[in-house]
Image (cartoon, rainbow, N blue to C red):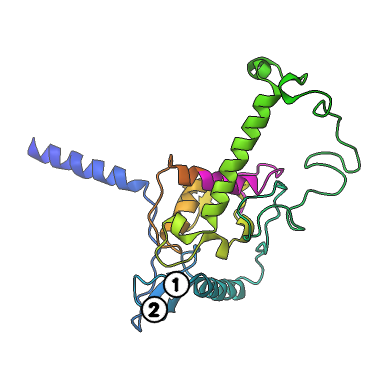
Amino acid sequence: MRAITIVLMVTACAAAGADEAPHHALPKARHGGTVVGLCDGQTATEVKVAPGTTLSRDQAQKVSDELMSEWRQKHPEAAWDDAAVAQNTTPSSDVGHGAGTSKHNAPPTGGAPGSQTGVPPKPTTATKAPAATQPRDQAGTYAAYTGRDELVWKAETQKFVDEGNAIFHDAKKLGGTIGISCDMCHPNAANTHPETYPKYQVQLQRVALLRDMINWCIENPVKGKALPDDSRTMRALEAYILAQRKGQKLDYGKH
């Protein structure tokens, strides 16, 4: 009976750990510094600061730039976005971090994302009546809600996206310990491509969701602790990254 119990315990432990992502295997520091690695799980460098030291933003950005330069040299064929190609044009409250309207994330000339170029948008009733009394075409579940309700939803959603934007650009809000934040390698959430998840990620050695890669980056380059799936921080980060790719077609499994 005891032998059966031990077998069951071992099996349970193995099953519990089977879904855990592998850790980034960084080389050991050779000169007493701190080793920092990219989210590819391979590219790394030793920074001349004692372990546990938090870099200034300028120092951290320099380290990120050096690592990205090395990665580009190893992968000359790779097309890495230098800035977000998002369709989101709503100005963000996170001023100073490149979010909001710019030449990189403005919608195509001649219409909103998904519309035919050159075709004017369909007139709305927004200027004809107060938001609460606007005639609406909604049916089914949303038929009972007013235009004012929709404006409130939109404002709350944008507020949450802005919250994720601020976290994405702030190492402390990410829970980082070395001073590196997500935007240092992914300006404006560039090259995150949330529309391509789920997909197999070599670093994780399994099929991953967007939140899995967010945690991988937080645990490794950022040197923080993984976020619970239902935490406000994780949800805000997902909201921001998804918002930056508004209008993109879903294409799961693409690399």
Q: Residues within 10 Å of mark 2 (few under 14, many from 20)?
A: some
Q: Quadrant of the C terminus?
A: bottom right
* Depth check, front residue: 12 or 155: 155
Q: Residue at x 71, y 54 (%)?
A: 85
Q: Name the spot of residue 212 as percent of width and height, x first.
A: 47, 49
The answer, for residue 204, to whether it is visible in the render is no
Disc 1 marks which amino acid?
Answer: Leu
Q: Quadrant of the N terminus?
A: top left
The residue that label 2 is drawn on is 49
Indicate yes or no whether the magenta region holds residue 249.
yes
Q: Earlier in the sequence, mark 1 or mark 2?
A: 2
Indicate yes or no whether the magenta region holds residue 57.
no
Q: CA distance from mark 1 to mark 2?
A: 8 Å
Disc 2 marks which amino acid?
Answer: Val
Q: Are marks 1 and 2 in contact (CB under 8 Å)?
A: yes
**SS for tag 1?**
loop
> Farthest residue toward the left?
2
Q: Residue at x 52, y 45 (%)?
A: 236
The residue that label 1 is drawn on is 55
* Depth check, front residue: 128 or 210: 128
Instruction: Please identify the quarter of the rendering in which residue 77 is found.
Output: bottom right
Q: Is residue 186 above or below residue 131?
A: below
Q: Which residues are magenta?
A: 236-255
Q: Is residue 135 above or below residue 65?
A: above
> Farthest residue toward the front?
130
The answer, for residue 246, to whether it is visible in the render is yes
Q: Residue at x 86, y 31 (%)?
A: 122
Q: Is residue 6 left or right of residue 48?
A: left
Q: Name the spot of residue 39 as percent of width and height, x first.
A: 49, 62
Q: Residues within 10 Å of mark 1 (few under 14, many from 20)?
A: some
Q: Is residue 227 left or right of residue 182?
A: left
Q: Name the spot of residue 159 as percent of width and height, x first.
A: 59, 42
